[in-house]
Amino acid sequence: MTREFVEYEPRFLDALVPLWREAFEFGVGIKDPNPLAEQREHFVARVLPSNRVTLALQDGRLAGFVASSAESLAQLHVRVDLHGQGIGSSLLEDAKTHSSGSLWLYAFTRNLRACRFYEKRGFVAVERGFEPTWQLEDVKYLWQAQTRSGT
Protein backbone atom coordinates (compact mmCIF):
# COMPACT_ATOMS: atom_id res chain seq x y z
CA MET A 1 0.00 0.00 0.00
CA THR A 2 1.40 3.36 -1.01
CA ARG A 3 0.03 6.62 0.31
CA GLU A 4 0.88 10.07 -0.99
CA PHE A 5 -0.40 13.61 -0.54
CA VAL A 6 -0.57 15.85 -3.58
CA GLU A 7 -2.00 19.20 -4.57
CA TYR A 8 -5.47 19.11 -6.11
CA GLU A 9 -5.63 17.88 -9.69
CA PRO A 10 -8.84 18.31 -11.73
CA ARG A 11 -8.68 14.68 -12.89
CA PHE A 12 -9.77 13.67 -9.37
CA LEU A 13 -12.92 15.82 -9.34
CA ASP A 14 -15.20 12.98 -10.45
CA ALA A 15 -14.03 10.89 -7.49
CA LEU A 16 -13.84 13.77 -5.01
CA VAL A 17 -17.48 14.87 -5.09
CA PRO A 18 -19.02 11.42 -4.37
CA LEU A 19 -16.39 10.83 -1.65
CA TRP A 20 -17.34 14.18 -0.06
CA ARG A 21 -21.05 13.33 -0.27
CA GLU A 22 -20.64 9.86 1.23
CA ALA A 23 -18.42 11.08 4.09
CA PHE A 24 -20.79 13.97 4.86
CA GLU A 25 -23.88 11.73 4.90
CA PHE A 26 -22.08 9.13 7.05
CA GLY A 27 -20.87 11.70 9.57
CA VAL A 28 -24.02 13.79 9.86
CA GLY A 29 -26.47 10.94 9.45
CA ILE A 30 -28.67 12.60 6.84
CA LYS A 31 -29.25 12.15 3.13
CA ASP A 32 -28.16 15.14 1.04
CA PRO A 33 -31.08 15.87 -1.33
CA ASN A 34 -29.03 18.08 -3.65
CA PRO A 35 -27.84 16.74 -7.01
CA LEU A 36 -24.16 15.78 -7.20
CA ALA A 37 -23.82 18.22 -10.11
CA GLU A 38 -24.68 21.11 -7.74
CA GLN A 39 -22.13 19.92 -5.22
CA ARG A 40 -19.54 19.65 -7.99
CA GLU A 41 -20.32 23.22 -9.09
CA HIS A 42 -20.08 24.42 -5.47
CA PHE A 43 -16.66 22.82 -5.14
CA VAL A 44 -15.37 24.34 -8.38
CA ALA A 45 -16.92 27.79 -7.89
CA ARG A 46 -16.66 28.28 -4.12
CA VAL A 47 -14.24 25.84 -2.48
CA LEU A 48 -11.38 25.76 -4.98
CA PRO A 49 -10.94 29.53 -5.50
CA SER A 50 -10.57 30.32 -1.79
CA ASN A 51 -8.77 27.24 -0.48
CA ARG A 52 -5.66 25.18 -0.92
CA VAL A 53 -6.81 21.61 -1.62
CA THR A 54 -4.63 18.63 -0.78
CA LEU A 55 -5.55 15.12 -1.89
CA ALA A 56 -4.66 11.90 -0.09
CA LEU A 57 -4.04 9.08 -2.56
CA GLN A 58 -3.78 5.45 -1.59
CA ASP A 59 -2.42 3.18 -4.30
CA GLY A 60 -3.19 5.99 -6.76
CA ARG A 61 -6.85 6.18 -5.74
CA LEU A 62 -8.44 9.15 -3.95
CA ALA A 63 -8.68 8.39 -0.23
CA GLY A 64 -9.54 11.84 1.13
CA PHE A 65 -9.02 15.57 0.82
CA VAL A 66 -8.67 18.76 2.80
CA ALA A 67 -9.60 22.26 1.66
CA SER A 68 -8.18 25.03 3.81
CA SER A 69 -6.93 28.59 3.76
CA ALA A 70 -4.33 30.19 6.02
CA GLU A 71 -7.11 30.90 8.56
CA SER A 72 -9.80 28.23 8.17
CA LEU A 73 -10.53 24.65 7.32
CA ALA A 74 -13.44 24.46 4.88
CA GLN A 75 -13.61 20.71 4.22
CA LEU A 76 -11.90 17.56 5.46
CA HIS A 77 -13.25 14.23 4.28
CA VAL A 78 -11.90 10.69 4.10
CA ARG A 79 -13.44 7.74 2.30
CA VAL A 80 -15.69 6.03 4.84
CA ASP A 81 -14.07 2.61 4.36
CA LEU A 82 -10.67 4.16 5.21
CA HIS A 83 -11.60 5.90 8.48
CA GLY A 84 -9.22 5.26 11.37
CA GLN A 85 -6.09 4.81 9.24
CA GLY A 86 -4.48 8.18 9.90
CA ILE A 87 -5.45 9.78 6.59
CA GLY A 88 -7.57 12.51 8.19
CA SER A 89 -4.87 13.24 10.76
CA SER A 90 -2.27 13.63 8.02
CA LEU A 91 -4.54 15.91 6.00
CA LEU A 92 -5.24 18.00 9.09
CA GLU A 93 -1.51 18.32 9.79
CA ASP A 94 -1.07 19.55 6.22
CA ALA A 95 -3.68 22.26 6.83
CA LYS A 96 -2.04 23.23 10.13
CA THR A 97 1.39 23.43 8.46
CA HIS A 98 0.06 25.81 5.80
CA SER A 99 -1.94 27.90 8.27
CA SER A 100 -1.08 31.27 9.73
CA GLY A 101 -0.68 29.62 13.14
CA SER A 102 -4.37 29.15 13.87
CA LEU A 103 -7.34 27.57 12.14
CA TRP A 104 -11.07 27.76 12.69
CA LEU A 105 -13.73 25.42 11.37
CA TYR A 106 -17.35 24.50 11.82
CA ALA A 107 -18.68 21.01 12.52
CA PHE A 108 -22.21 19.82 13.07
CA THR A 109 -22.70 18.87 16.70
CA ARG A 110 -24.45 15.64 15.71
CA ASN A 111 -21.26 14.54 13.90
CA LEU A 112 -19.77 13.22 17.12
CA ARG A 113 -16.95 11.42 15.32
CA ALA A 114 -15.74 14.68 13.72
CA CYS A 115 -16.09 16.63 16.97
CA ARG A 116 -13.99 14.05 18.85
CA PHE A 117 -11.46 14.00 15.98
CA TYR A 118 -10.88 17.76 16.13
CA GLU A 119 -10.88 17.95 19.93
CA LYS A 120 -8.24 15.20 20.16
CA ARG A 121 -6.08 17.24 17.78
CA GLY A 122 -6.08 20.46 19.75
CA PHE A 123 -9.22 22.24 18.54
CA VAL A 124 -11.33 23.94 21.19
CA ALA A 125 -15.03 24.75 20.88
CA VAL A 126 -15.38 28.54 20.96
CA GLU A 127 -18.95 29.10 19.80
CA ARG A 128 -22.17 27.16 19.28
CA GLY A 129 -24.76 28.08 16.71
CA PHE A 130 -27.26 26.96 14.14
CA GLU A 131 -26.57 26.39 10.45
CA PRO A 132 -29.65 27.54 8.52
CA THR A 133 -29.09 25.67 5.25
CA TRP A 134 -29.04 22.24 6.91
CA GLN A 135 -31.16 23.30 9.90
CA LEU A 136 -28.62 21.75 12.28
CA GLU A 137 -26.75 22.88 15.37
CA ASP A 138 -23.09 23.50 14.77
CA VAL A 139 -19.96 24.28 16.73
CA LYS A 140 -17.08 26.55 15.79
CA TYR A 141 -13.66 25.17 16.69
CA LEU A 142 -10.37 27.00 16.97
CA TRP A 143 -6.84 25.62 16.91
CA GLN A 144 -3.79 27.71 17.72
CA ALA A 145 -0.21 26.61 17.31
CA GLN A 146 1.72 26.36 20.54
CA THR A 147 4.30 29.10 20.82
CA ARG A 148 7.45 28.78 22.84
CA SER A 149 8.08 31.53 25.33
CA GLY A 150 11.32 33.39 24.81
CA THR A 151 11.66 32.52 21.12
Image (tube, rainbow, N blue to C red):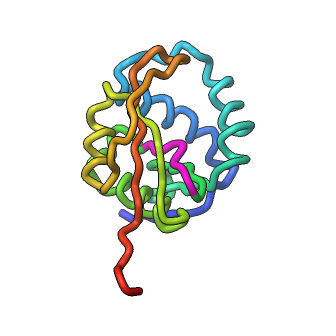
Q: Residue visible at 57% across and 35% down?
A: 17
Q: Residue at x 49, y 52 (%)?
A: 61
Question: Seen from this angle, which residue lies furthest front?
Answer: 150
Image spot of residue 148 (x, y percent): 35, 79
Residue ranking furthest to the bottom: 151
Q: Quadrant of the N terminus?
A: bottom left
Main SS, magenta residues:
strand
Near-viewer residue (72 or 57): 72
The quarter of the picture where the C terminus appears is bottom left
Residue sitting at 61 percent across and 24 percent down? 36
Q: Is residue 94 left or right of residue 9?
A: left
Number of numbered tags placed on the structure image: 0
Q: State the image coordinates of residue 108 (x, y, percent, origin top left).
A: 39, 29
Residue 92 left/right relative to 121: right
Rendered location of residue 50, percent (x, y): 69, 48
- Provide the residue span drawn in magenta: 71-77
Residue at x 51% of width, y 50% of height:
66
As displayed, is residue 112 above or below residue 52? above
Q: Nearer the viewer, residue 128 or 19?
A: 128
